[in-house]
Image (cartoon, rainbow, N blue to C red):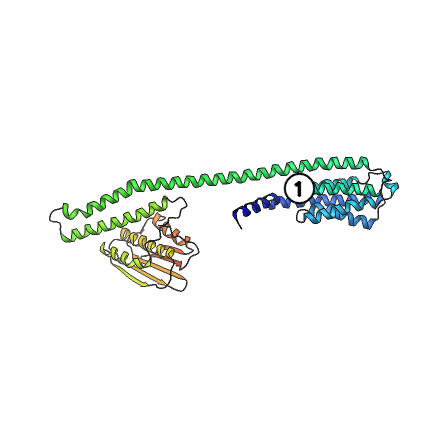
Amino acid sequence: MTPMKATKSEHRRQRNALPRDRTFVLTVILSVIAVILYTVLVPVHAAIYGAPVAVTMALALAAVGAPLISLWYPNLALLLFTVSAVLFPLMVSREASVSAPWPWSVPMLIAFVVVVATVTFRRGWRPGLIQFALGSAAGVIAAIMQPSIPSGTSLIVTTSIVAGIYLIALLLAGRLRLGEELTRERANTAQEQSRRELVEERTRIARELHDVVAHSMSLIQVQASTARYRVPDLAPDAASEFDDIAASARGALTEMRRILGVLRTEDQAAELAPQFGIDEIPTLVEATRRAGAAVSLSHAVSGDISTATQLAIYRITQEALSNALRHSPGAPISVSLSADDTDVTLVVRNPYDAETPGTPGGHGLRGMHERATLLGGSCVAAGSDIDRFWTVTARMPRHPNVSLEGTP
């Protein structure tokens, strides 16, 4: 379906369809009116107009039920009411018609008003006008078929009343549709305002990261890279440490550029594929070992795994190793990667001596949990009072339904 056709179809649905709660209320009201009109219409036509009771009951059911039926089947309702409007006046005797309003009795006039108002309110001006015209024509046809019965005054009064009700229903329906459109416009405006505020906030964060953090990391990288030339008699081990610091700073700057690219992308989807995955975890572990930690790695993952899952596994491993180095320096760390047909499991474990291995509810733990949850997985970080080990366990699907290709 083309966008233009889709737009026209949507407008048509908005014009013809009422909200469910309003339809329910309208159904209840019309049902009550139908019951009341039926209990009055049948006795009036049977007693005053002398119409056959069985025929009157059938025609009255069609007349008072037409407004209710028009909520779902407007064409059927139009047919039922028009037929009953033509036949009702023909079922009475001339003597009874002379002493009572004809061709429209008062209950039938009310039923005519209700069906025109309902069709106009529910379906719009054109179906309501058709119902008004056919109902009026039914009265004229009855008058033509019974020329000896005076009917001019009744027809004029009926047509005038129903025409007024038709205009009122038309104005009320237009006012309600206008209110609904204004409500939708306000919602769209609020959504656009929220999106604009989000973009402005992301831009401000990107600016702060670029001006403060990236600048500081650049200075660290330059100072570490030039240390062997600026510091005389620098020991080889110290020079190697400075080189590792410079390499880490360069990697951090690369990551910072990717983060800035994501933050400055208004649609929140950076056009950069993830650069890190499960295959880079051994390199990450080796870098952690060079920082002085004893890290063991068990890697038993193979097969096709989505880039989003690989990136999330890499980031959670990176954060877990960073937390272990920060909160339990010198403690051995074990990293275990395994996979089955549907999921990939990561377990990072290290002993701790402090009462609290980290800050509960910290941003790092929250970030790990959010990454796993967005992919349809789980990430739990908890300590054990028995063996005093801190364990991070993440389990994520190989191919999640949600793609995070642009997430840093």
**Amino acid under label 1?**
Arg
Residue 362 visible in the snapshot: no
Identify which residue is drawn at 28% across, 48% down.
252
Q: Position of residue 127 (x, y in %)?
A: 67, 43
In the image, is 66 to the left or to the right of 307?
Answer: right
196 up-or-down from 357: above or below? above
Q: Position of residue 118 (x, y in %)?
A: 68, 42
Q: Position of residue 237 (x, y in %)?
A: 16, 53
Q: Disc 1 marks which residue?
A: 126
Q: Quadrant of residue 172?
A: top right
9 or 108, which lies in front?
9
Label 1 crowd bin: few (<14), some (14–19), many (20+), radius 10 Å:
few
In the rendered image, the residue lying farthest to the right is 95
70 or 150, which lies in front?
150
Q: What element does badge 1 sit on?
A: helix
In the image, is 118 to the left or to the right of 265?
Answer: right
Identify which residue is drawn at 80% across, 45% down.
88
Residue 342 visible in the snapshot: yes
Q: How many marks?
A: 1
Q: Position of residue 353 (x, y in %)?
A: 28, 54
Identify which residue is drawn at 22% across, 49% down.
246
